[in-house]
Amino acid sequence: MGISPFTKEQLLPQPETLEIKKQKGELFIGLPKETHLQEKRISLTPDAVAALVAHGHRVVVETTAGEGANYSDREYSEAGAKVSYDIKEVFACNLVVKVEPPSLDEISLMNPQAFLISALQLKTQSKKYFEALAKKRITAIAYDYIKDEHGVFPILKSLSEIAGIASMHIAAELMTTANGGNGLLLGNIGGVPPSDVVILGAGTVGEFAAKAAIGLGARVKVFDNSITKLRRLQQYIHTPIYTSTVQPKSLLKALMRCDVAIGAIRGVDRSPIVVTETMIENMKDGAVIVDVCIDRGGCFETSKITSHSTPTFREHGVIHYCVPNIPSRYSRTASVSISNILTPYLLNIAEEGGFENAARYDKSLRNGMYFYHGILTNKTVADWFDIPFRDINLLIL
């Protein structure tokens, strides 16, 4: 009789070694007041703070941080946050949540190895910003880079929706006689021809601008060089709408007749200029241009950046509105939108036991992470500023 190659102990059932899930972590969140020019939004509303506090997290809010969005210190206090008059205390939290990226002075107030969630706004940054983050070994997530499992940038899409609808509200306001417009109502009144609107771009901004204009009763024409985007727009609008590729002759004809023109074409590095100065010279006196993509250079040749305090200028008799940060004009709506998207991410980070564990399982967080403990992990930033980077997937195993 042969000898069995297995011992008795080896034949007995053996315990399986499983990965032990990290225990739920506690977040210590700092919510500072925005210092960027004319920025009135805030990343977390009192309702979001209440939800975080209910899950055992601590939140420190700088006094008057929510004032621009009409949230009082009392509302944050009643939600369970600590309202602080000391900016150093806010930035001493291990997680700082902002709308705009922090300034160099604000980064200097952060603790080493802290975490940051804010916008990145790459085109407005300098190399010094990234050097300061690296020196403090910060882990930073750009919410404008967070991409979900459907391939959508949720916060960017939401803010684009706001900008699209807002562009039509702004245009309607500027068309009034009191604001130097041609005195037309952006609508469809019985016996009166409807207003004509030209929209450049069939992305999210263009889609929601078109929906708002059609809802008011205007005649809408949308131009975009992507046939796929134009077809998708027609499906989303659920009503016949004029669409065309960007051809100078047909675009000039449409601009000569229109009362409002919306610029919503976003390029990779900058927006292409599709409307020349000659075309603008042929537009109606008192017509309105709202260049939503001015933060990328704008798609009208005559566009130049304006501010919320001085939002318009006239060129060739045409009113130009070229404010880069339109959602901030509707700070309350924009704050609720950002907060509603960020809060589930924050709760999930805590449930997974911290940023490292959450990023390991949540690809959307990895997409948004551009610094990991002081190491640059975003190739776009690396190429733009000529800084060495590491792949985040090799750092988080």
Image (cartoon, rainbow, N blue to C red):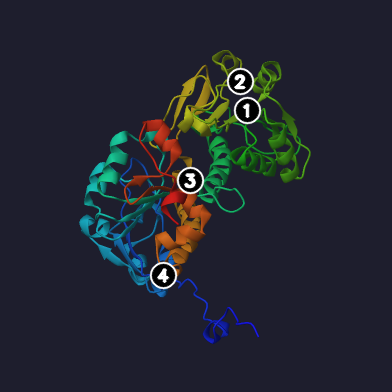
Mark earlier in primary sequence (1, 4): 4
Q: Secondary structure at mark 2?
A: loop
Q: Secondary structure at mark 4?
A: helix
Mark earlier in primary sequence (3, 2): 3
- Observer-nearest of 337 and 376: 376
Q: Nearer the viewer, mark 2 or mark 4?
A: 4
- Observer-nearest of 361 and 337: 361
How far apart, in angstroms, are the residues tagged by discs 1 and 3?
Answer: 35 Å
Identify the residue under disc 1: 259
How far from the left and from the top, in percent, is residue 114?
Answer: 30, 56
How far from the left and from the top, in percent, is residue 251?
Answer: 67, 21
- Observer-nearest of 363 and 21: 21
Q: Which mark is residue 50?
A: 4
Q: Residues within 10 Å of mark 1 (few under 14, many from 20)?
A: many
Mark earlier in primary sequence (3, 4): 4
Q: Secondary structure at mark 1?
A: loop
The type of residue carrying mark 3 is Tyr
Q: Residue at x 64, y 22 (%)?
A: 255
The type of residue carrying mark 1 is Asp
Mark earlier in primary sequence (2, 4): 4
Identify the residue under disc 2: 284
The type of residue carrying mark 4 is Ala
Quarter of the picture holding the N terminus: bottom right
Q: Residue at x 65, y 35 (%)?
A: 202
Query: Pointer 3 and pointer 2: residues touching (CB < 8 Å)?
Result: no
How far apart, in angstroms, are the residues tagged by discs 1 and 4?
Answer: 46 Å
Identify the residue under disc 3: 145
Query: Pointer 1 and pointer 4: residues touching (CB < 8 Å)?
Result: no
Query: Pointer 3 and pointer 4: residues touching (CB < 8 Å)?
Result: no
